[in-house]
Amino acid sequence: MAEKKEKLKLYSYWKSSCSHRVRIALTLKGIEYEYVPVNPLKRDEFLKINPMGAVPALVDGDVVVSDSLAIIMYLDEKYPVPPLLPRDLHKRAVNYQAASIVFSGIQPYQNTPVARYIEEKTNAEEKTAWVSNAITKGFTALEKLLVSCTGKYATGDEVYLADLFLAPQIHAAINRFQINMEPYPTLAKCYESYNDLPAFQNAVPEKQPDAPASTS
């Protein structure tokens, strides 16, 4: 009798946009996984999984991968269908650029510990301005990058890496930071398309098991 394969475990936090990206990837690829919620205020046990203490982290048997991009690339290589990168080299580069703008140019500046630190050192208004500036600067760059290559989604009519990074970021911008999407019609069009995809809708923060009841 074949040994039953252990499910992958995703250590996640409902509001984390980094975890949100990975949830989309797992669902898109049809991978069953165990959702392990991480309380950001009680991370002692989780530090044994990821010493940095940041979600997400993926456990696949003896393999532990942290960082959302590393996890998504690991999943894409282990489970290559559907692919998360296009064959076209230019479009592939655009996907990398879009992902980079989100994970290095926007997300770190809106991260809760960073925003809290800014507020402690200044005030709530300065914190809001700090976060809004990072998002609008990044969205302006993304709009220019993608305007000439979008189809239904960021780089054509198939979902790729860029979409996995855009969807959570736009969701957070609208719902957490009240960013007006009118100046970014290309991004707004992509976001509307994501709303038709179950893999994207099932991954939203409000539908996660550790989300507060008031958000669902």
Image: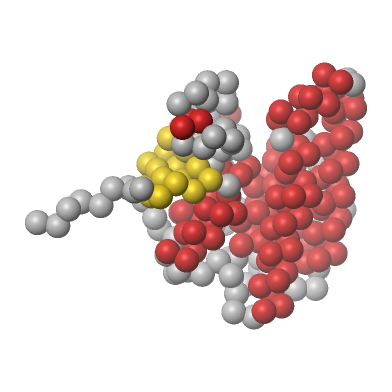
Residue 194 left/right relative to 140: left
Farthest residue to the left: give it: 1
Residue 203, percent from left and from top: 52, 46
Q: Report if residue 179 is visible in the image.
A: yes
Residue 213 in view of the camera: no
Quadrant in the picture for the C terminus: top right
Q: Is residue 172 left or right of residue 144?
A: left
Instruction: Specify the quadrant that holds the N terminus.
Output: bottom left
In the picture, residue 131 is in which quadrant? top right
Report whether 4 appears left or right of 9. left
Q: x and y percent of residue 174 in the render?
A: 74, 41
Residue 19 locus on image (x, y percent):
56, 43
- Colouring convention used in this rendered image of the protein: secondary structure
Residue at image point 46% right, 36% down = 49
Q: How many marks?
A: 0
Depth check, front residue: 66 or 123 = 66
Percent x, y of residue 109? 78, 39
Residue drawn where x is 46% and y is 32% of the image: 48
Q: Residue at x 14, y 57 (%)?
A: 2
Q: Is residue 151 above or below residue 164?
A: below
- Residue at 57%, 26% (x, y): give it: 40
